[in-house]
Image: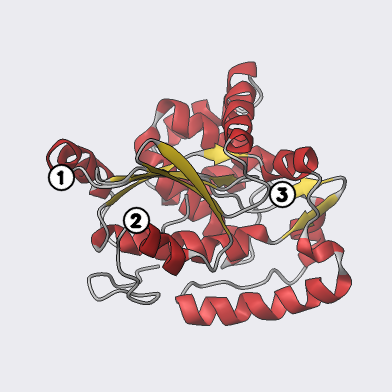
Amino acid sequence: MLCYQDNDMKIKAKLRQSEASDGLHKWSFMVLPLKPWPQLYPRAPSLLDVAASFTFKMQGQLTPFGATTSSFLQVLCRYRHNWSIELRFRPAFLGAIMNTTGNQPPAMNPKRGQYMMKDIKRMAEYYQVPIQIPQDFMGSIIKKGSLSAMRFITAVDMTQPQFLEPVSRELWMRIWSRDEDITQPESILAAAKEAGLPSELAQKLLAMISTPEVKSRLKETTEEALEYGAFGMPAVVAHVNGESHLFFGSDRLELLGNFIGEKWLGPVPAASKPRL
């Protein structure tokens, strides 16, 4: 859900139109707490259901999965101009994934957490993604969380799917690039406005985040991710020859490309320019 607009927002529609004639891989991409997830299918423009999240809360703890996953998703977005894939973003809740599978956030280990902070900076430079760790990390990421933003994205997905990617991108940019809030209603509405969502419509979607329908949808996509074997993020489910294959981790792009018969061309392939 975090492709920073490498090109125009019509890519999704164009890919759908070409699906019947091209037929390449179809993938499923899953990324969970405030993240959406992807799915893949071979020889049919690979359909990538991308699940991305900004942060997630688990037993009072949050980790910057949104930062690491965003690099992976941004590069994947760039590759839709090089690989025959269709990206489809789907909100899911990482905290539930972690709790259900008994997984532990990397930052729960102090040494690993310290290393991760350094690694995020390395990834930002390598993948050319504008990541800036919030100054008040504990307050912005650990204590506040992003469930409201995740539910807002879910409401967008349910009613205005054409805005799903741009709204997700703007929310991510606020917290992970500009160190701005994404928990308050006015912050969510500001991100929606930047994404081009009409103000009146954004207000209606914001009112939906506390409804049973939105909560159930988020739960459903999260459970689907679990059914595919997801235990963290980023997770990609590649559907090949009628079978699903899970790929986990921000360093699996090259392996993923090889698996679907595509070539890895680095973080910024020639046909794409990072436009963040």
Q: Which residue is mark 2?
A: 260
Image height of 258 relative to 84, above or below? below
How many C-alpha atoms fall within 10 Å of the one at disc 3: few (<14), some, or many (≥20)? many
State how far apart marks 1 and 3 are (Cα): 37 Å
Q: Which residue is mark 1?
A: 22
> In the picture, residue 161 is in which quadrant?
top left
- For discs 1 and 3, the disc positioned in front in the rendered view: 1
Q: Position of residue 173 (x, y in %)?
A: 53, 61
Which corner quadrant holds the C terminus?
Answer: bottom left
Q: In the picture provided, is 113 more to the left or to the right than 32?
A: right
> In the picture, residue 111 is in which quadrant?
bottom right
- For discs 2 and 3, the disc positioned in front in the rendered view: 2
Image height of 44 relative to 5, above or below? above
Q: Secondary structure at mark 3?
A: strand
Residue type beneath disc 1? Asp
State how far apart marks 2 and 1 are (Cα): 15 Å
Q: Position of residue 217 (x, y in %)?
A: 57, 25
Q: In the picture provided, is 59 more to the left or to the right than 51?
A: right
Picture residue at 43% right of the left edge, 52% below the top: 194
| Disc on the earlier residue, 2 or 3 | 3
Q: Which residue is mark 3?
A: 56
Whether pointer 2 and pointer 1 mark residues with C-beta atoms closer than 8 Å, the reply is no
Residue 60 appearing in the image: yes
| Disc on the earlier residue, 2 or 1 | 1
